[in-house]
Amino acid sequence: MIQKAGIACNVAVVGAGFAGLTAGVRAAQGGRKVLVFEKSPEEFYLCNSRLTGGVFHVALNDIFSDEEMLERKIMDITGGAAKRELARAIARDTKRVVSWLQGFGVRFIRASPDPWHSRVLAPPAIAQLGRRWQGRGGDALLRTLETELKKVGGEIRRGHRAHQLRRESDRCVGFTGVTANGQEFEVTAQATILADGGFQADPERLRGPITPAPEKVVQRNAGTGTGDGLRMAQAFGAAITDLNAFYGHLLSRDALSNDALWPYPWVDLLARSCMVVGSDGRRFADEGLGGTYIANQIARLPDPASSTVVFDQAGWDGPGTERFLPPNPNMIKAGGTVFKAKALPELAKLAGISEAGLLSEVESYNRALKLGTLEQMSPARTTSLCKPYAIEKAPFYAIPLAAGITYTMGGIAIDECCRVLRTDGTVIPGLYAAGNTTGGMEGGEKAGYVGGLCTSTVTGFRAGEHIVGALAT
């Protein structure tokens, strides 16, 4: 019988993305022996952190905005689904974490006049068709974090995948796992931090809470978030938050089979300004709430590959051209389908939409827009966040849509110190969680988006900081 390799440390971290490395560096700075276990054996292992554009914001606000305002914003956009103490932590500590990162050489730039672009990782990731991330944005930050981890005595163990948490009495004392070459190992640690990301790349975990048909949702992510930490924590008795929301964007339906169509171009701004319908030609969601909300609604449809955004020339020349790599003209350049017709009946036929349903819905929408009654429609149409465009002047356009999922918003329940909670609300000694493997900061009925970089780095920082104090007592 082959013996398991025994590994001992003060702090064992599962996952080497932003949350895991931030936690590891902070704990190692406090004098703790830290090992970070990454399942990929690759030097430049893929994860969402490596692919990110690198924008540090809090709910699309400047991280240096008033803390009470930021906390209110988080609670508002999540419809109260966020835990108040976690919302307060994000509002207060994002700027503290950014300053801490700058202390060991991480650089930021202002990427645009928008307040939420005031702190963007440098050198900036370039918005472009396809995925080229080397040396920029998230990749640069991961390299810097690993360098700092080594300076303070920690290290990443690549090719080590955690499988099961270890228990002594009521305490977590580490975990077991298997290396990339099949060697079993056993970790003993005073504190374990689960930070391996969400479950967006696990089709069976997505099936049900996120979508009835995960094969019809575009994996707009690194493909590595398989929910290992969530599964291990749940088996250990951890409480789990709602798992029914995700952060993502609206993409061409062709992205289901054409990798050139993700992560860009988005169709979010067109969709929130115009009209999204199902194959029956009817609206099914409040477009004015934005791309992440619409993407969640599309994913929940019985057939997530059945929705289409409809607009006219004004929409195509307006919101269709806004932001980086907009659909006009990049959708066609990248091989995405854009239908164009001189009349709505012809457009309906091209797009496979019910002609009667589409004509009726466009008429109702245009009438409500002129009368100022969009918010009285069913479903209601929010008008406070963006300008709605009429659909009335030929030529008319349609783009078949798919929801692109970047990361899941729900996960392991934690307190403000990132300690994992049991179903009765008590703390599991020795067990922490950070980043997208956790819940309680984003989501709710409107899929409120707070920001993956701020939530990951703040929870990682707080977990590492709390462990330094806890292990000193």
Image (cartoon, rainbow, N blue to C red):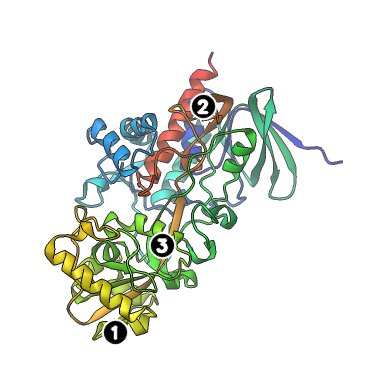
Image coords of residue 70 (percent x, y): 27, 36
CA gap, disc 1 to disc 2? 57 Å
Question: Identity of the amino acid at label 3?
Answer: Ile
CA gap, disc 3 to disc 1? 24 Å
Q: Secondary structure at mark 1?
A: helix
As displayed, is residue 126 above or below residue 437?
A: below
As displayed, is residue 282 above or below residue 374?
A: below
Image coords of residue 339 (percent x, y): 33, 81
Question: Identity of the amino acid at label 2?
Answer: Gly
CA gap, disc 3 to disc 2? 34 Å
Q: Secondary structure at mark 2?
A: loop
CB within 8 Å, label 3 to label 2: no
Image coords of residue 159 (percent x, y): 64, 47
Which residue does the numbered mark 2 point to in the structure image?
Answer: 425
Which residue does the numbered mark 3 point to in the structure image?
Answer: 298
Quadrant that contains the C terminus: top right
Instruction: Identify the residue shown where x is 23% and y is 55%.
Output: 382
Work out whether residue 99 or residue 316 is closer to the camera in this orientation and state it: 316
Work out whether residue 373 or residue 437 is closer to the camera in this orientation and state it: 373
Which residue does the numbered mark 1 point to in the structure image?
Answer: 345
